[in-house]
Amino acid sequence: MKILVVVVTVVVMLAVIIASTGLHSWEYQKSVDGIRYSRVRSEDHPSHGRITIGRLADPVEIDGRIYRDWLHRREDGTIVGGLLAEDTIAGDLNIPAGTWVSFTADNDLRACHFPKDQDIQGYRCRGTGGGGKGAVVSFYPSGRLKFFFSGTDITIRNIPCRGGLFSGIGLHEDGQLQTCTLAKSVTIYGRDLERGTRVHFTEDGVLTTPAGGAQ
């Protein structure tokens, strides 16, 4: 009887895990919109609506770019994200193979997860080491750098910004500093701010960080 109870418990736990991870929804060796997947499923995304997520059976070319492994697409066929099989160009940006790229619904480059550190518009942006998770580099629809992680502390417009994976740096579209974590204690517009404080600036350069301790 005890063995039966243990077996039933394990089966129930496995069923819960499968249901929660969506493993039951995968379809194998299937083509969707002419694209062959080794496995594929659809799900509702809060930002992109109904999307198709799949592991490609073979590299595929879409909108002049070649993707391999994983690909995410919207119902209208536009790319949510995918892993580049070859070097490509988006605007003025050279993107190496192995980069996970994300696009807006208007097909503007939204973000990249570079496999290695990249020099972009005067900044050394941290890479991920491969894959679509980790240090993201995001862009405005114009192609200007919006957000990134630096491997080292850097100074932007006389503001010492902390580097590292826990201190992202944001820029306004014109290149002015939008947000960063202070790498050292400084005085800004008469306000003494401690190292570790998260600071925010408007497009006009006005400091909007609320009063308080370090973050």
Image: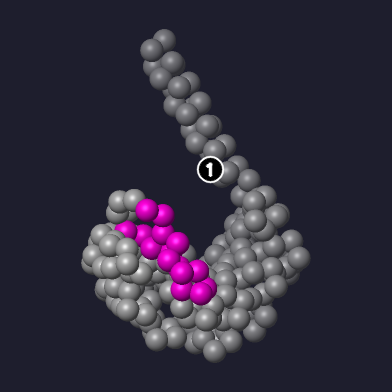
Q: Main secondary structure of the magenta part?
A: loop
Whether residue 16 is situated above or below residue 185 in the rendered picture: above
- Magenta stretch holds residue 208: yes
At x 28% / y 62%, what residue is drawn?
192
- Magenta stretch holds residue 146: no
At x 60% / y 60%, what residue is drawn?
54
Q: Position of residue 197 (x, y in %)?
A: 32, 59
At x 64% / y 69%, what residue is drawn?
104
Q: Position of residue 38 (x, y in %)?
A: 59, 61
Residue at disc 1, secondary structure: helix
At x 67% / y 58%, what residue is drawn?
48
Q: Position of residue 62 (x, y in %)?
A: 66, 77
Q: Which residue is mark 1?
A: 21
Front in this rendered view, residue 140 or 211? 211
Magenta region, residue range = 197-211
Quarter of the picture containing the N terminus is top left
Whether residue 21 is situated above or below residue 124 in the rendered picture: above
